[in-house]
Amino acid sequence: MAKLTWGTAALGAVLCAGTQAQAQVFTPSYQSPTLVDEAGVHVSGGPGAENDLVVEGMYRRGRMGFRAGYIASSSSHLSLGTEVRVPLTTRFPAAVVGSVQGLIGYDKAVGFELGITTGKRFVTYGVAYTPFLHPRLAAIDGLEEHRFRYSIITEAGANIELPGHSALVVSIGGLGDAPEVGMGFVLRP
Protein backbone atom coordinates (compact mmCIF):
# COMPACT_ATOMS: atom_id res chain seq x y z
CA MET A 1 0.00 0.00 0.00
CA ALA A 2 1.28 3.44 -0.91
CA LYS A 3 1.72 6.06 1.79
CA LEU A 4 1.09 9.68 0.93
CA THR A 5 2.44 12.38 3.22
CA TRP A 6 2.12 16.15 3.29
CA GLY A 7 5.72 16.27 2.05
CA THR A 8 4.85 14.19 -1.01
CA ALA A 9 1.83 16.38 -1.72
CA ALA A 10 3.93 19.55 -1.34
CA LEU A 11 6.63 18.15 -3.64
CA GLY A 12 3.98 17.37 -6.25
CA ALA A 13 2.61 20.90 -5.99
CA VAL A 14 6.07 22.44 -6.39
CA LEU A 15 6.92 20.26 -9.39
CA CYS A 16 3.63 21.00 -11.10
CA ALA A 17 3.00 24.62 -10.17
CA GLY A 18 5.17 26.07 -12.92
CA THR A 19 3.72 24.03 -15.75
CA GLN A 20 1.23 25.42 -18.19
CA ALA A 21 -1.70 23.12 -18.77
CA GLN A 22 -2.93 22.11 -22.19
CA ALA A 23 -6.32 22.97 -20.69
CA GLN A 24 -6.34 19.93 -18.37
CA VAL A 25 -6.49 17.44 -21.25
CA PHE A 26 -8.89 19.92 -22.71
CA THR A 27 -11.08 20.76 -19.66
CA PRO A 28 -10.71 20.75 -15.85
CA SER A 29 -11.21 17.39 -14.16
CA TYR A 30 -12.92 18.51 -10.92
CA GLN A 31 -11.52 15.35 -9.27
CA SER A 32 -11.31 15.08 -5.50
CA PRO A 33 -10.36 11.70 -3.97
CA THR A 34 -13.86 11.18 -2.57
CA LEU A 35 -16.03 8.72 -4.50
CA VAL A 36 -19.50 10.19 -5.05
CA ASP A 37 -22.51 9.62 -7.24
CA GLU A 38 -23.35 12.92 -8.93
CA ALA A 39 -24.60 14.62 -12.07
CA GLY A 40 -24.00 18.24 -12.91
CA VAL A 41 -23.04 21.07 -15.20
CA HIS A 42 -19.58 22.67 -15.18
CA VAL A 43 -18.46 25.92 -16.83
CA SER A 44 -14.80 26.87 -17.31
CA GLY A 45 -12.52 29.30 -19.12
CA GLY A 46 -10.50 32.27 -18.01
CA PRO A 47 -7.71 34.71 -18.74
CA GLY A 48 -4.93 33.05 -20.69
CA ALA A 49 -6.92 29.84 -21.12
CA GLU A 50 -6.88 28.32 -24.59
CA ASN A 51 -10.66 27.88 -24.43
CA ASP A 52 -12.88 30.95 -24.26
CA LEU A 53 -15.81 29.06 -22.73
CA VAL A 54 -16.47 25.41 -21.90
CA VAL A 55 -19.85 24.02 -20.84
CA GLU A 56 -19.87 20.34 -19.85
CA GLY A 57 -22.29 17.89 -18.37
CA MET A 58 -20.76 15.26 -16.09
CA TYR A 59 -22.11 12.07 -14.58
CA ARG A 60 -20.18 10.08 -11.96
CA ARG A 61 -21.22 6.86 -10.31
CA GLY A 62 -18.73 5.30 -7.93
CA ARG A 63 -15.37 4.87 -9.67
CA MET A 64 -16.56 5.72 -13.21
CA GLY A 65 -17.42 9.05 -14.76
CA PHE A 66 -18.57 10.36 -18.13
CA ARG A 67 -18.59 13.86 -19.60
CA ALA A 68 -19.83 15.60 -22.73
CA GLY A 69 -19.72 19.26 -23.58
CA TYR A 70 -19.18 22.16 -25.92
CA ILE A 71 -15.92 24.10 -26.16
CA ALA A 72 -16.20 27.58 -27.68
CA SER A 73 -12.80 28.81 -28.86
CA SER A 74 -11.33 30.00 -32.16
CA SER A 75 -12.77 26.76 -33.57
CA SER A 76 -15.63 25.13 -31.67
CA HIS A 77 -15.50 21.50 -30.54
CA LEU A 78 -17.66 18.80 -29.03
CA SER A 79 -15.92 17.18 -26.06
CA LEU A 80 -16.49 13.55 -24.98
CA GLY A 81 -14.67 11.75 -22.19
CA THR A 82 -14.60 9.08 -19.54
CA GLU A 83 -12.66 8.68 -16.30
CA VAL A 84 -11.94 6.18 -13.57
CA ARG A 85 -10.98 6.95 -9.96
CA VAL A 86 -9.46 4.26 -7.69
CA PRO A 87 -9.09 5.16 -3.98
CA LEU A 88 -5.78 4.33 -2.29
CA THR A 89 -5.43 3.03 1.25
CA THR A 90 -3.42 5.84 2.83
CA ARG A 91 -3.49 7.93 5.99
CA PHE A 92 -4.43 10.96 3.89
CA PRO A 93 -7.27 10.52 1.35
CA ALA A 94 -5.93 9.93 -2.17
CA ALA A 95 -6.98 8.24 -5.39
CA VAL A 96 -5.35 7.27 -8.68
CA VAL A 97 -7.22 8.86 -11.57
CA GLY A 98 -7.08 8.05 -15.28
CA SER A 99 -9.09 9.55 -18.10
CA VAL A 100 -9.43 9.86 -21.83
CA GLN A 101 -11.05 12.81 -23.60
CA GLY A 102 -11.65 13.48 -27.26
CA LEU A 103 -12.47 16.60 -29.25
CA ILE A 104 -14.56 16.56 -32.40
CA GLY A 105 -14.75 19.66 -34.56
CA TYR A 106 -12.63 21.60 -37.04
CA ASP A 107 -9.58 19.99 -35.44
CA LYS A 108 -9.73 16.55 -33.87
CA ALA A 109 -7.74 15.55 -30.81
CA VAL A 110 -7.49 12.91 -28.12
CA GLY A 111 -5.93 13.22 -24.68
CA PHE A 112 -5.02 10.74 -21.97
CA GLU A 113 -4.05 11.48 -18.40
CA LEU A 114 -2.93 9.51 -15.36
CA GLY A 115 -2.31 10.99 -11.95
CA ILE A 116 -3.24 11.19 -8.33
CA THR A 117 -5.73 13.38 -6.52
CA THR A 118 -5.46 14.11 -2.84
CA GLY A 119 -7.52 16.12 -0.40
CA LYS A 120 -9.21 15.93 2.98
CA ARG A 121 -12.89 16.49 3.78
CA PHE A 122 -13.76 18.98 6.55
CA VAL A 123 -17.28 19.59 7.92
CA THR A 124 -18.23 22.94 9.47
CA TYR A 125 -21.76 24.09 10.34
CA GLY A 126 -23.36 21.45 8.11
CA VAL A 127 -21.26 22.31 5.04
CA ALA A 128 -18.51 19.91 3.95
CA TYR A 129 -15.37 21.20 2.20
CA THR A 130 -12.91 18.98 0.33
CA PRO A 131 -9.93 20.98 -0.96
CA PHE A 132 -7.92 18.89 -3.43
CA LEU A 133 -4.72 18.87 -5.47
CA HIS A 134 -4.62 16.83 -8.68
CA PRO A 135 -1.20 16.54 -10.42
CA ARG A 136 -1.00 14.24 -13.44
CA LEU A 137 0.84 13.29 -16.62
CA ALA A 138 -1.02 14.13 -19.83
CA ALA A 139 -0.52 12.93 -23.41
CA ILE A 140 -2.28 14.84 -26.19
CA ASP A 141 -2.47 14.06 -29.92
CA GLY A 142 -4.08 16.33 -32.46
CA LEU A 143 -5.07 19.98 -32.77
CA GLU A 144 -2.21 21.82 -34.51
CA GLU A 145 0.30 18.98 -34.22
CA HIS A 146 -0.24 15.38 -35.30
CA ARG A 147 1.99 13.70 -32.76
CA PHE A 148 1.71 13.08 -29.03
CA ARG A 149 2.83 15.87 -26.72
CA TYR A 150 3.42 15.15 -23.04
CA SER A 151 3.20 17.47 -20.07
CA ILE A 152 2.77 17.45 -16.32
CA ILE A 153 -0.31 19.43 -15.35
CA THR A 154 -2.01 20.15 -12.07
CA GLU A 155 -5.29 21.39 -10.75
CA ALA A 156 -6.29 22.74 -7.35
CA GLY A 157 -9.89 22.93 -6.32
CA ALA A 158 -12.55 22.33 -3.73
CA ASN A 159 -15.83 20.49 -3.46
CA ILE A 160 -18.27 22.41 -1.29
CA GLU A 161 -21.15 20.15 -0.28
CA LEU A 162 -24.22 22.24 0.48
CA PRO A 163 -27.01 21.11 2.83
CA GLY A 164 -29.32 18.73 0.99
CA HIS A 165 -28.28 16.88 -2.14
CA SER A 166 -26.18 19.42 -4.00
CA ALA A 167 -22.60 20.65 -4.17
CA LEU A 168 -20.59 23.46 -5.67
CA VAL A 169 -17.28 22.47 -7.28
CA VAL A 170 -14.56 25.07 -7.87
CA SER A 171 -11.33 24.40 -9.78
CA ILE A 172 -8.21 26.29 -10.84
CA GLY A 173 -6.23 24.38 -13.43
CA GLY A 174 -2.74 25.06 -14.68
CA LEU A 175 -1.46 27.00 -11.67
CA GLY A 176 1.15 28.43 -14.01
CA ASP A 177 1.17 31.24 -16.56
CA ALA A 178 -2.33 30.56 -17.89
CA PRO A 179 -4.67 29.27 -15.20
CA GLU A 180 -8.07 28.03 -16.25
CA VAL A 181 -10.88 28.60 -13.78
CA GLY A 182 -13.94 26.38 -13.59
CA MET A 183 -17.06 26.04 -11.50
CA GLY A 184 -19.79 23.45 -11.44
CA PHE A 185 -23.05 22.68 -9.71
CA VAL A 186 -23.85 19.02 -9.09
CA LEU A 187 -26.75 17.07 -7.65
CA ARG A 188 -26.12 14.01 -5.50
CA PRO A 189 -28.70 11.35 -4.60
Image (tube, rainbow, N blue to C red):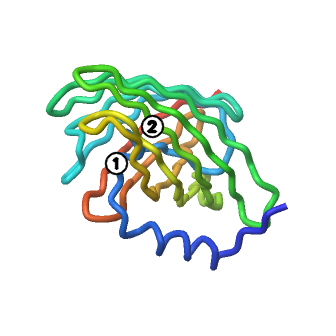
What is the tally of numbered marks visible in this picture? 2
Q: Position of residue 67 (x, y in %)?
A: 48, 26
Quadrant hosting residue 55: top left
Quadrant hosting residue 56: top left
Mark found first going from the N terminus, 1 or 2:
1
Q: Residues within 10 Å of mark 2 (few under 14, many from 20)?
A: many
Residue placed under numbered mark 1 in the picture: 22
Q: Residue at x 45, y 37 (%)?
A: 111
Q: Position of residue 128 (x, y in %)?
A: 60, 53
Quadrant hosting residue 165: top right
Q: Residue at x 24, y 40 (%)?
A: 51
| Type of amino acid under label 1 | Gln
Is 112 situated above or below 82? below
Question: What's the mark number on residue 30?
Answer: none
Question: What's the mark number on residue 111?
Answer: 2
Indicate the secondary structure of the residue bearing disc 2. strand
User: Quadrant where the C terminus lies?
Assistant: top right
Indicate the secondary structure of the residue bearing disc 1. loop
User: Quadrant where the N terminus lies?
Assistant: bottom right
